[in-house]
Image (cartoon, grey):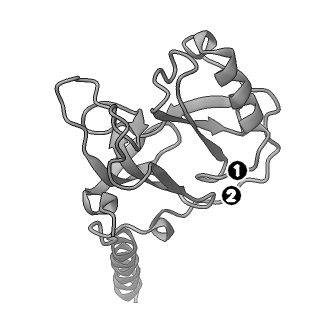
Amino acid sequence: MGCNIKSNEFLILVSCMLLSFGALSQDSSNPQFSDYLVPVSNGPFEKNIHFNKEQENYSPHWKNAAQEQLKKPVNFSGHFRIYKTFGGYGKECLRDNWVCGWVIDKLSGEVVATLPSDNNGSYNYADISDNGIPVGLPFEIDAYKNSSMIAVTGQSISINKSDSPVCKTALFNFNNSGYVKLIESLEGCNNQ
């Protein structure tokens, strides 16, 4: 009898492991927002933004905008707010044709991340090139308050001036302070 109980426990354990593996083995070639669901917090949320040492040196325009964004509802990954803006105000986003963005943790009031960086190391994007010509579709972020996945479509501004920017769509999973790239495609930028 004791042998049957142990073998039943073993079968239950193996079954649970197989079911867990099946749930975790998502189709990595086609990630969906629903694959990365997170609970959405109702607060209480921080009322004042808290800047780190680097952010303290950003423009007053950016700091005021970040404070205003903190007051708005969660729009990403459970308790975060994505804030994006065109640049041209300060060193946080130099050029006026750049699109820059940050992730604000509404629970702590801290700016915890920028937009995801591309392979070239840049987290600044543009939907037009330096000569003013549109490149593919306009810059776009798709994110949901109940998912940690984010889709970014646009061309990143290369840190290395000799690189040619490429417009693409990239999907990332946000882990509360950084990103893991899931997949990218050049198809997302083709006008159809």
Q: Do callouts 2 and 1 mark residues in contact (Cβ within 8 Å)?
A: yes
Q: Secondary structure at mark 1?
A: loop
Question: Which quarter of the figure is the C terminus placed in?
Answer: bottom left
Q: Which residue is mark 2?
A: 40
Give me the disc on residue 74: 1
Identify residue type, mark 1: Val
The structure residue drawn at horizontal position 37% and vertical position 68%, both measured from the top left corner, is 24
Mark 1 surroundings: few (<14), some (14-19) or many (≥20) residues within 10 A: many
Camera-nearest residue between 130 and 170 = 130
Q: Position of residue 73 (x, y in %)?
A: 75, 50
What is the x, y in percent for residue 85?
57, 36
Q: Position of residue 179 (x, y in %)?
A: 41, 43
For the N terminus, the image quarter is: bottom left
Is the residue 4 above or below the residue 63 in the image? Answer: below
Which element is circle 2 on?
Answer: loop
The x and y percentages for residue 22 are 34, 76
Q: Earlier in the sequence, mark 2 or mark 1?
A: 2
